[in-house]
Amino acid sequence: MTDSLTVRDNRTGAEYEIPITDGTIKAADLGQIKLNDDEPGLATYDPGFVNTASCRSSITYIDGDKGILEYRGYPIEQLAEKSNFLEVAYLLIHGELPTKEQYENWVHEITFHTFVHENVKGFMQGFRYDAHPMGMLMASVGALSTFYPESRHIEDPDNRHIQIVRMIAKMPTLGAWSFRHAQGKPYIYPDNELSYAENFLSMLFKMSESKYAADPRIAKALDVLFILHADHEQNCSTNAVRSVGSSQVDPYSAVAAGIGALYGPLHGGANEAVLKMLRRIGTKDNIPAFIEGVKNGEERLMGFGHRVYKNYDPRAKIIKKACDDVFEVTGVNPLLEVAQELEKIALEDEYFVKRRLYPNVDFYSGLIYEALEFPPEMFTVLFAIGRTPGWLAQWLELTQDKEQKIARPKQIYTGARTLDFVPAEERWA
C-alpha cells in the first residue's frame, strides 16, 4: 500500500493521488489541481507557517505534546546537566559529540578568536549613549561581513568553518561591549585564560581589578542558560536566518537577520514581559485577583504556554534549578516568591490545566538575568549569544541541502486589478 492522499476536487470531479512522505505532502504537488490549464494550480495559505514544513533538518527534535527537546538526539536535560555550552555548540554544528582532541581544538579556536578588529570597537563607540544593545549587536554582527569579505564564499567548507568559529567566539565580545556602552564604561577586552561564560562575565563586569574572578555558580548557570537557548527548531529567528541565507549570502548577514527577528517582543522579549507582570502583581496576596482577571480576559498570563509545547517546557524545569544556584550567590529575588505561587496555582487550576498552559523557559529566565543585574534590554542579547550556534548549524545545513531554494513564498493578491491610469494634470484639474 502506497502512502498517499487522495484528493477530490469537487469543482471538476477530478481526483489526484498525492504522495505522503515523513507525514507531509509537498505543497508543489497541489499545483496540479486546477480548473483548467490556463489558471494557476491550487496553493496553500498558512500565515506564520503553523502547519507548513520549510525544510528537512536533523538538528533539533521537539515533541510538544510530550515535552521533549533533543539536540542531535540528545535530551536537553542530559546536556544541561553533564555537558557545557561549547561542547553543545560543537554537537549542533558537527552533528556528533567531539573526541577529546576535537574538543580541545574547538575550544582553542573559539578562545583565540574572541578579539574583534579595533575598527569594530570604533564602529560601536559611534552609537548614541542610549542605543539599544540589540540594535548595536545586530549592526555589529552585520558589519563583520565587511571585515571578512571572504565569508561570502560559502561553497568552501574550510571558509565556512572559520566564519562559524569567529561568530561563536565574537558574539560575547560584541554583546558585552553593547552592555558597557549603555553604561558609559570602557570596553573590556577578552581574557583567553577564562572559560566561555567566565570571559563573558569578565567583559561585562570587570572594573579596576587586574583579574576578574566570576563565581563558578554564576558561570555555570549562565552556561546552562546558553545551552537551553542554543537551538529550538524552526522558530521565527531561525526561519529568518534560513530565509535570508537561502539567497547564499554570507553567514554574518544571515545571523544579523536572526538577531533582528529576535529583537521583536513576540520572540525574544517574553521574559521581560514576565518581569513586568510579576512586578504588577507585587505580592502573593494579589495573585487570586490577578488569576481572576486572566480568566475574565482582563489580564495576560505571561511565561505560560508555548506555540510548540502543550506540556511542561523541559527547559523550564532545568532553569528552576539554575535559579536556586544563582540566588544562592545574589540573594533571592523577591519576585521569586510571587512566581512560584503563581506557577503553583496555575498548575492546579482547572482553567489553566484544561488549556495546557504550563510555564515556559521565559518564566524563570528573566528572574535570573535580573538577579545578575542585567537591565531588561540585555535579556535578548543573552538569548542571541546562546542561540548563535543553533543559527549557524541551521545555516550550515541549509547550504548543504540540495532540495533548498531561495525563499519566495506565494501570496494571495487582494488588491485592485486592471485600473486605467489617469495623468496627474487630468486628475488634479
Image (spheres, rainbow, N blue to C red):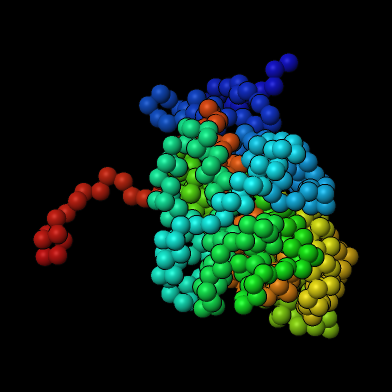
From the viewer's perspective, is residue 188 above or below residue 169?
below
Residue 339 in the figure: left or right of residue 246: right
From the viewer's perspective, is residue 232 above or below residue 99?
below
Which quadrant of the structure image shows residue 385? bottom right
Residue 67 visible to the viewer: no
| Foreground pick, 265 / 136 | 136
Residue 422 in the figure: left or right of residue 194: left
As drawn, the residue found furthest toward the top would be 1
Which part of the image, by quadrant, shows the C terminus? bottom left
| Foreground pick, 136 / 244 | 136
From the viewer's perspective, is residue 290 above or below residue 5?
below
Q: Where is residue 281 in the image (x, y as percent from the top left)?
A: 75, 80
Q: Where is residue 204 in the image (x, y as percent from the top left)?
A: 62, 69
The residue under the point 79% across, 52% down is 80
Residue 80 visible to the viewer: yes
Q: Position of residue 416 (x, y in %)?
A: 33, 50
| Foreground pick, 68 / 51 | 68
Q: Where is residue 33 in the image (x, y as percent from the top left)?
A: 51, 27
Which quadrant of the structure image shows residue 356? bottom right
The residue under the point 81% across, 77% down is 332
The residue under the point 68% across, 75% down is 373
